[in-house]
Every structure is written in C-alpha cells, then in structure tokens.
Amino acid sequence: MSDAVPPAQQACRDEIVRVGASLFLRGYAHSTAGNISLRLDASQGGGFLITPTDACLGHLRPEALAWVGEDGHQRGGERASKTLALHRQIYDAAPQARCVLHTHSTHLVALSLQGVWTEQDILPPITPYQVMKVGHVPHVAYRVPGDPAVAHEVAGLIARAEQPLRAVMLERLGPVVWHQGPAQAMALLEELEETARLWLLCSPRPAPLSDARVDELRQRFGAPW
C-alpha cells in the first residue's frame, strides 16, 4: 500500500510536472526519454520523487510520480525510472544537490556522436555564462541505459573534481545535471545545450576564452571552472 502523501510534498510534485512540460514543449526532451528527481526534506516526507519509467516528461501526472525512500524502497506512485540508482548516487556524492535532471538533448547527443572536445570537458570554455553557470562537464563512456556502473563512475567523478561538478555527459544518451532545485537544474541544462548548439554551428570553431578571462570570471562570480 502506498504511504500517505504529506501536504508539503504536493508543491514538489507540481514543480516536477511544470519543469517536465516546459522542457518537452521547448524541445529539450522528446518521447519517453529523460527523467527528473527531487530530494525531499523531512517535512515533505523524506526520500525522493522521481519520474516513472518510460514516462513522457511532457505529460507527467503529479500523482503518478514515484516516491522512493532513502533506502530505495518505493513508497508510492508508478514504477520508478531505471536511472534511480544514478540519481541516488549523485545525491550521496553531492549533498548540496536537491534536483537531478536527465534528457537526451539533441545538440549534446550530436556532440557526443561527433566527438567531444576532451574526456574531461565536453566543450571548451567559449561563453562566460557557460563558465559561470555550468562549469566542467566530463564525458562518461557509453554503457547500456540503467547500468549501475555508470552511477559509480559519476559518483567518483564528483568526488575527485577540483571544482564542484554540476553535470556530466553520458555518451549517446545525453546530459545529467543537478542543482538546488528543478528551476535551477533546468536553467543549467538550457545553458549547456545552447553552448553545444553554438559549438556545432560555428565553422571554424571559436577559440576558447583565455585563462586570464576564465580566471576573471572565477574571481568576480565564483565560476566553477
């Protein structure tokens, strides 16, 4: 039997639905690709909310979202996304994260098919807002969707990073980003996808910002680069 949903949890459910619909309507997500999760505090019932497996982000229903306890036991809703293990490992490795978002965004997937800049950074620092809002984005080699080895690798990348990581790129699958809430995670994804689009559109490729310019962004805005 499903646990009773605390009243404070409803706003979290509604926000996930809002963000999913926004991403879908603007072409950042398609079909049943992608997933969103949110870490809940004690007043909201604890554990996590995550989109159901094979759900379309454009047609989510608040009551269908999977509610999962800290122990991984499902407490309510439809069957949780197969990426739940990855989301949980990110929350464990990045305690400041409240929302994890994954899509198969077109330009970022195209970038991984064409070849990323480096394995440590899928894109060079070409715009100030990329440096300020996104930071470093490592490339994670392809594995079958839902493979638990991906979750362990991403957790290791977060632990070893010299600057706080906010995103990784899964080869052929798309970006995974995390932030303090759904709106912030969505904005980070938008910035990353737009940077990939700019990179793919430019011929010849633009020169990266110089080390001095990047350092200026660190000093003035705390850029995570």
Image: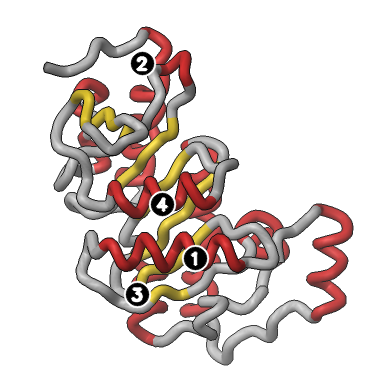
State the separation of the CA atoms marked 4 and 2.
Answer: 25 Å
Q: Can you tell which quarter of the image residue 214 is in?
A: bottom right
Which residue is denoted by mark 1 in the rendering? Answer: 156
Q: Is residue 161 left or right of residue 60?
A: right
Numbered label attached to residue 10:
2
The extreme left residue here reads 1
> Which residue occupies the foreground of this view, 186 or 41?
41
Identify which amino acid the numbered label 3 is placed on.
Glu
Residue placed furthest toward the top: 7
Tag 2 or tag 4, which sits nearer the N-term?
2
Q: Residue furthest bottom?
A: 204
Question: Helix or strand or loop: what does disc 2 sit on?
Answer: helix
N-terminal-most mark, 1 or 2: 2
Name the residue at 55% across, 49% down. Answer: 94
Q: Secondary structure at mark 4?
A: helix
Q: Amino acid at mark 4?
A: Gln
SS type, badge 3: loop
Q: Nearer the viewer, mark 4 or mark 3?
A: 4
